[in-house]
Amino acid sequence: DSGVTQTPKHLITATGQRVTLRCSPRSGDLSVYWYQQSLDQGLQFLIQYYNGEERAKGNILERFSAQQFPDLHSELNLSSLELGDSALYFCASSPPVAGTDTQYFGPGTRLTVL
Amino acid sequence: AQTVTQSQPEMSVQEAETVTLSCTYDTSESDYYLFWYKQPPSRQMILVIRQEAYKQQNATENRFSVNFQKAAKSFSLKISDSQLGDAAMYFCAYRSPWISNFGNEKLTFGTGTRLTIIP
């Protein structure tokens, strides 16, 4: 158990819908990262938050947004869902100080868009 | 931008034998971190081993060790005494160091190697 939690584990929805994925980082970790793992794209970085502020953006679609709350949990919002958004979405967290480089992954949320 | 290449989509090894998974990367940075993550059928991403680029010594974790060749930009994973529980996808990953105002600490992954253990 990495200490990172993600809910829900599975999500099945229809095209055009909107969903919210939730992540709670390990205790004390200030950085949260979101990654998408799809069959044909591998693991891709979406976005990073650090202590409530967006720190880096990767290949995140405009239909997707995220935020990190004062209690440091993070939510990834996916809207106008398309079939191609079906994937495993991981959240990872890492400690707040320089030199602590390891990211610890949650169990992931499997999103299926029908 | 950094890239990570795993040229072996699939590997297999007999139980109790040794196997080496290959990874190469491309970067212009002198300081960075390299990781191997394991993804079993449960799909959980599990850290296997990490290497800091400024350290000459190869990292080891029990039956897992790496061969880090900085000049060649190569980072291979050796699994000794392979066990059935080692069967998984293995991902090599690269990360830039934390710089206070830089914001480039994402992991860049290779495409993975599926390891099968033959009983």
Image (tube, helix red, strand yellow):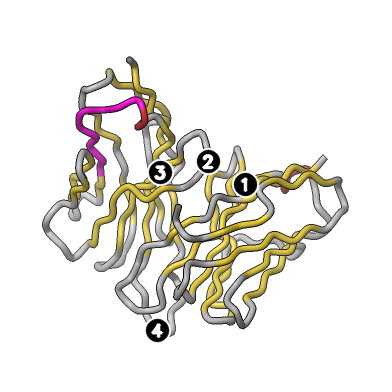
Few, some or many residues within 10 Å of mark 3 (<14, 14–19, 20+): many
As for residue B83 lying within the magenta part, the answer is yes
Between disc 3 and disc 2, the foreground one is 2
Between disc 4 and disc 1, the foreground one is 1
Q: Are marks 4 and 2 in contact (CB under 8 Å)?
A: no
Q: Amino acid at mark 3?
A: Phe
Q: Amino acid at mark 2?
A: Arg
Viewer-proximal residue among A6 and B26: A6
* Residue that numbered label 3 is attached to: B91
Q: Secondary structure at mark 2?
A: loop
* Residue that numbered label 2 is attached to: B43
**Picture coordinates of residue A101, whole percent (x, y):** 35, 67
State left or right for residue B99 relative to residue A14. left
Give the letter of the chain under mark 4.
Answer: B
Viewer-proximal residue among A32 and A44: A32
Q: Are marks 2 and 1 in contact (CB under 8 Å)?
A: yes
* Residue that numbered label 1 is attached to: A88
Mark 4 to mark 2: distance in Å?
32 Å
Q: Are marks 4 and 3 in contact (CB under 8 Å)?
A: no
Mark 3 to mark 2: distance in Å?
12 Å
* Residue that numbered label 4 is attached to: B100
Quadrant of the image containing the C terminus of chain B: top left
Q: Are marks 3 and 2 in contact (CB under 8 Å)?
A: no
Magenta residues, start to end: B76-84
Few, some or many residues within 10 Å of mark 1 (<14, 14–19, 20+): many
Q: Amino acid at mark 4?
A: Ser
Q: Residue at x 58, y 66 (%)?
A: A24
Give the letter of the chain under mark 3.
Answer: B
